Image: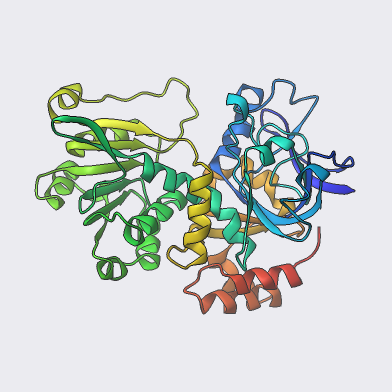
Amino acid sequence: MKTKAVRLYGVNDLRLDEFELPEIKDDEVLVEIVSDSICMSSYKAAIQGAAHKRVPNNVAENPIIIGHEFCGKIVEVGTKWADKYKAGDKFTIQPAINYQGKLDAPGYSYNLCGGAAQYVILPREVMEMDCLLPYEGDAYFYGSLAEPMSCIIGAYHAQYHTTNGSYVHDMGIKKGGNLAIMAGAGPMGMGAIDYAIHVDPRPSLVVVTDIDTARLNRASEIITVEDAAKNGVKLVYVNTAELEDADAYLMELTEGKGFDDVFVFAPVKPVVEMADRLLGRDGCLNFFAGPVDSKFSAMFNFYNVHYGSTHIVGTSGGNTDDMNESNTLAHKGIIDPSCMITHIGGLDAVVDTTLNLPKIPGAKKLIYTHKSLPMTALADFAELGKTDPFFADLANIIAKNNGLWCAEAEKYVLANAKEI
């Protein structure tokens, strides 16, 4: 079977290739990918090449398929897994397979398995580690967003607080506490806001900071302070660039107590250091954003560590339980990851989009792997629709959904967009 896929050969060397897939082995599974969303981690892998921890040293001779946020259908099942999976079933995967303690992962390490492709072969370790997950949703894009949402969910579960006089840690964010999401108007921050106000344990205050007014305004339109209030949460959006004394303003929102939980969504030294300054007693700082620089560092107040019990935690990805939670919450409509998507495109848009990802405004870029489609902002559909009926129809569809991507829009693309 032939497949088209975007493969990494080295530093900034991504290519859209077509090649023949071999017959699957008894312990492998052949799948069709329908949707894949582009992660900043793929950009990091592309600009680092073999220097990336998950990318093999021989990538120039044995290129890997990028993309790890994918969803699709099972095509063929090896005999070893015939009792567990069957052709035609929808699936998502947990790419952090942690097989025998190795960092190998789909989208980084395999020449036949990654999300930016039409068909791929899942290696046996994906099934052995129970990382091939059933998916029951109507729209494939929700399955693609399950992985980034699982990273957010994992970060929430990794938070912890101490108990006076005891060495037992209370896991998770503080119920009824003060929570800050810093540099939080991007795609992952949006998911974090959604989770904070809709899933227990809920904080009483959520403050979202950013320095981009347009992003903050859009975030506030999608996840409103009114919706948060209905769920018992006071939600405040703050542009710290417009404040003379951001620390003082943010501390005032907590009545001087500081924040119990602070998430940092950008690997920026001043942001990390501000987060440290905002911590209240027993405050937990979650450094969510993964830096490219292996020597990235920032100052941390160790006086407060000793006397105020402040502490720090970092997570990279989620686990299978987090993925299952993400799928369940989205399927039940408790969270809506569609707020993360601002652009759609086809497989032929992956190379340029990935290599230029930090320069492209907006949030998540969603790919339909069997389609030929330029990377296009949802906000541009109406203008493009003046001369293109395809985008006119899409503009009308998402207009009924507060400008958000939805199952109806996906079905329209799958039925009407040009095949690659």
Residue at image position (25%, 33%) is 168
Q: Is residue 45 above or below residue 256?
A: above
Q: Is residue 299 left or right of residue 81?
A: left
Q: Position of residue 2 (x, y in %)?
A: 89, 48
Identify which residue is drawn at 24% across, 50% down: 242
Q: Is residue 221 above or below residue 353?
A: below
Give the x, y percent position of residue 226. Answer: 28, 71
Q: Is residue 51 above or below residue 282?
A: above
Report whether residue 169 is seen.
Answer: yes
Residue at point 79% right, 27% down? 62
Who is closer to the viewer here, 2 or 221?
A: 2
Between residues 19 and 24, which one lies in front from this camera angle?
24
Judging from the image, the colouring scheme is rainbow
Q: Position of residue 176 (x, y in %)?
A: 20, 54
**Which of 164/256 is in front?**
164
Quadrant of the image occupied by residue 8: top right
Q: Is residue 209 left or right of residue 97?
A: left
Q: Residue at x 69, y 73 (%)?
A: 412
Which quadrant, please, contains the C terminus?
bottom right
Does the image show residue 388?
no
Q: Which image quadrant is residue 237 in?
A: bottom left
Q: Residue furthest front?
A: 83
Q: Position of residue 291 (x, y in %)?
A: 46, 31
Q: How many marks?
A: 0
Answer left or right for 307 relative to 15.
Answer: left
Seen in the picture, residue 229 relative to 116 is either above or below; the reply is below
